[in-house]
Image: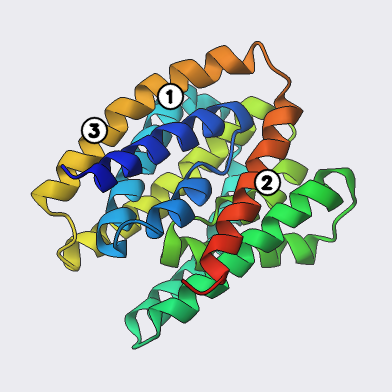
Amino acid sequence: MTWIEAVFLIIIFLSNVIQTITGFAGTALAMPFSLLILEETVVKPVLNIVALGVCLFIVIRHFKEIDWKEALWMALFISIGFAGGILVGLLPHDGTIFLRVYGGVIIAVALLFLFIHPEKHNVPTWVLLICLVLGGFVHALYISGGPLVVIFAMLKIKDKHKFRATLSFIWIIFNSALLIEHGIQGLLTPHVGLLAGIGLAATVVSIVIGQFLARRMPKNVFMIATNILLLISGVLLVIPH
């Protein structure tokens, strides 16, 4: 393992501490920083496997708390964007342009949560459905549709346990689809498996630490810090390097 891969695993660890506290943004936070130091062919499958493992753990523990009605709506509209993202990803494209567009989306989401606070407004349903479609599109390309989908979920699912269980169930569906795609592309190498295994082990520790911190520090402080980090990561992807 190289020192860059060690930094990558530290990013996974820290992002999952924040994910445990805030309930979102784990992969969306890890992905931009990871793409700055490692190639997509390693970052994407590893982060997908780690996220899938975390979601499976949550769903197994809280299966009865899934809001099936909202899960159906979410899966339906996310799948539209997800299919579009898969198709676009298969076409010849300039990866640099895609990364900058992705960075722009991350910046927009971070600014939205920092200054507008959608959970405090009566957002039209059609806007929420567009967020789901866009979330599916971004997820297909960069496994980071969570923040966009959270806009829908936070307004439709008020109970925090149902919120977490329902989102985790949704991501099991789409992350499993990405796992199959990565397998077809030949990205699931033994080395990727090793990094994912270490990442999952580190995530167990990050969940324990995140739960400890969540009981002792205000969640809103972490929310602000998370969105500032998302903003920084988006800016780093957008600027030429």
Q: Quadrant of the N terminus?
A: top left
Q: Position of residue 176 (x, y in %)?
A: 33, 51
Q: Is residue 118 visible?
A: no
Looking at this view, is 49 or 33 the one in front?
33
Label 2 and label 3: CA atoms lie apart by 27 Å
Q: Earlier in the sequence, mark 2 or mark 3?
A: 3
Q: Earlier in the sequence, mark 1 or mark 3?
A: 3
| Image height of 71 relative to 100, above or below | above
Amino acid type of the residue that numbered disc 2 sits on in the rendered structure:
Ile
Q: Position of residue 179 (x, y in %)?
A: 28, 55
Residue 206, labelled with which disc? 1
Q: Residue at x 40, y 84 (%)?
A: 94
Q: Earlier in the sequence, mark 2 or mark 1?
A: 1
Q: Residue at x 31, y 63 (%)?
A: 40
Looking at this view, is 110 or 80 the one in front?
110
Amino acid type of the residue that numbered disc 3 sits on in the rendered structure:
Ile
What residue sits right under mark 3 in the picture? 198
Q: What is the secondary structure assignment of the residue under circle 2?
A: helix
Label 1 and label 3: CA atoms lie apart by 12 Å
Question: For this view, does 221 lie left or right of residue 80?
Answer: right
Are there few (<14), some (14-19), or many (20+) residues within 10 Å of tag 1?
A: many
What residue sits right under mark 2 in the picture? 228
- Dividing the picture into quadrants, the one containing residue 77 is bottom right
- Dividing the picture into quadrants, the one containing residue 178 is bottom left
In the rendered image, the residue lying farthest to the left is 190
